[in-house]
Amino acid sequence: MNKALLKIKPVGGVGQIGSNMTLIQGANDTILIDAGILFPYEDFFDINYLIPNLEDIPTPSHLVITHGHEDHIGAIAHVVKKFPNIKVLASPFTAGLIRKKLEFNHTPYPITEYKHFEQLGFKDFTIDPIHVNHSIPETVGLLIKDVSEQLGFFFISDFKIDEKTIYERPFDFEKLIKLSKNLKKRILLCDSTNITSKTTQTPSEQDLIPIFDNLFKEAQNRIFITCFSSNIHRLMTFIALCKKHNKKLIPHGRSMISYLNTANELGMIPDYASVVKMAESVTGSSENHVILLSGCQGDFRGTFRRFCIGEDSQFKPQSTDTVLMSSKAIPGNEKKISMLINKLSEAGCKVVTGSDQLIHVSGHPGRDDLKRLYDNFKPTDIIPIHGESYFIREHIEFIKSTYPLATPHYILNNDEIVITNDLKLNILDGETIDPIIIHGRGIVLEKEKISERRKLACNGSVFLSLKLTSTRMKVEKFNFSLMGLPTIVTLNEERFKKFLDNYFIQINFKDIEKTNEELRVAIRKYFDQILGYKPITTIHIL
């Protein structure tokens, strides 16, 4: 009977963009790759984030991190809490980001650093980090080989191919080819983020430099830039241009400052001390200031939003300002970003977006880039990952039409890829498991509570407190508060009071539970006649 040689199961990140986590199992080893968060949909009512459900995951010995984006490191605090003996491995820059994040949340944990040239050894398999390009430094793909070196998975959830960038080495195809050339079974698990993009070859970060150079030169007053705080190479471009044009760069927003400080502490930014200035040291307005704003997705509490609507304590939009939108809207954020652009326009600012000029490039591959990866790795099988279910399907069709030498496989979260010792690939369908909702200080919030929040948000609420007489039969006095109801109701509370007075005359509380429910229903009907809907009604008997 053929035994399982290796098993791979995506716990998150396949069928959705976010909460990336993948389980790798051999006969003796169990490890996780990445531990990310998923940002909630707007109707989740200010929920912080979601994470994969960890309950049924067998205890892993190691957590290997591919890069420092939130959708790959944001859930680490929850993983180390669930598995307190797990060893976390990350590159130096990524490790620095993780340490800062854990310290900020008062959950420090030891992080072991690995270099891109090191092999990570386990009993059943080895892992070789392969340097790739992305929109954050020190991103790697992972070449996972069984100890007999017959089977290899190349796990590459986020990448682009950038051969012109001055900030890092190009994608290390040479190492990938050298280490995989003798494999009999080569399985590629590959990024699907940009499969629907019309841009078939992702431009280089280098292509942005002359555009920004010209914009810096043309600006007569302050320049505000919003972009992803993690894009250190782009921030390095801004620092270099500030030095060239005799300007000061001012990072504004916690994440922007944190990412820049981490890169500076590791010696990645040579001109940091001479160019970068902290916002609290700024007095007045200067045409030599370039202000970097975090929160480029229009986050409700983000620095960029506060600035746009005039609520930032440090900077207000002025008609002489130039605002550069150096990022792309994540699907679902388009409307709120558009609203903020309109606010800037109303203030008279000059706004430049990626639709106007090339001031943003993606960190993910176009179709030509994917084809180049196929040609270099020469996979026998390709499994699209890192994308919504529609992207995964589109990627499957692209493989069929472009690279018929490989067999494509469609999987979603919790499906399991099993490779037996005769190198046969089998896919076992997994269960749909809802993610865990995290709110406040890392607290789990049950899914049904979201329904309660939705009802409160849509219908408003009535809170009624009753004090009964000593015989517990009649109401001695009462108090109520109305929340989230229209002014026509809240200005006419006397009418509601009379309704309650009359109702209490007619009833007694001999059967408290029954009478309490009848009163709740009567109140909801009362408001339904006025509003056309029934507010959430809560009654407390003292």
Image (tube, rainbow, N blue to C red):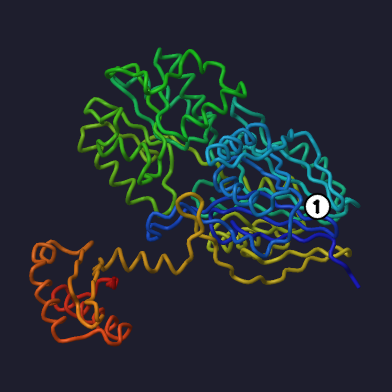
Q: In the depicted view, which residue is nearer to us: 222 or 530?
A: 530
Residue at image position (20%, 81%) is: 474
Between 75 and 397, the one nearer to me in the picture: 75
Q: Secondary structure at mark 1?
A: strand
Work out whether residue 25 or residue 327 is closer to the camera in this orientation and state it: 25
Residue 433, by quadrant, is bottom right
Q: Which residue is mark 1?
A: 152
Q: Is residue 401 left or right of residue 254?
A: right
Crowding at dot 1, Cα within 10 Å, few <14 / some 14-19 / many 20+, comes out as many
Quadrant occupied by the C terminus: bottom left
Identify the residue shown where x is 65% and y is 65%.
Answer: 414
Q: Residue at x 26, y 78 (%)?
A: 520
Q: Residue at x 46, y 14 (%)?
A: 243
Q: Is residue 39 above or below residue 408?
A: above
Q: How many marks?
A: 1
Looking at the picture, does residue 242 appear above or below residue 17? above
Task: Give the answer, above or below, for where 42 lies relative to 431.
Answer: above
What x and y, as percent, mark residue 257?
Answer: 47, 29
Query: What is the x, y in percent for residue 325?
Result: 38, 36
Left or right, 439 with reference to 511: right
Q: Amino acid at mark 1?
A: Gly
| Quarter of the figure that contains the N terminus | bottom right
Percent position of residue 534, x then y? 24, 75
Of 413 and 471, nearer the camera is 471
**Left or right, 287 with reference to 404:** left
Res 456 quadrant in image: bottom left
Q: Vertical placement of 219 versus 295: above or below?
A: above
Residue 300 is situated, as x and y percent measured from the top left of the image, at 35, 46
Outermost residue on the front side: it is 470
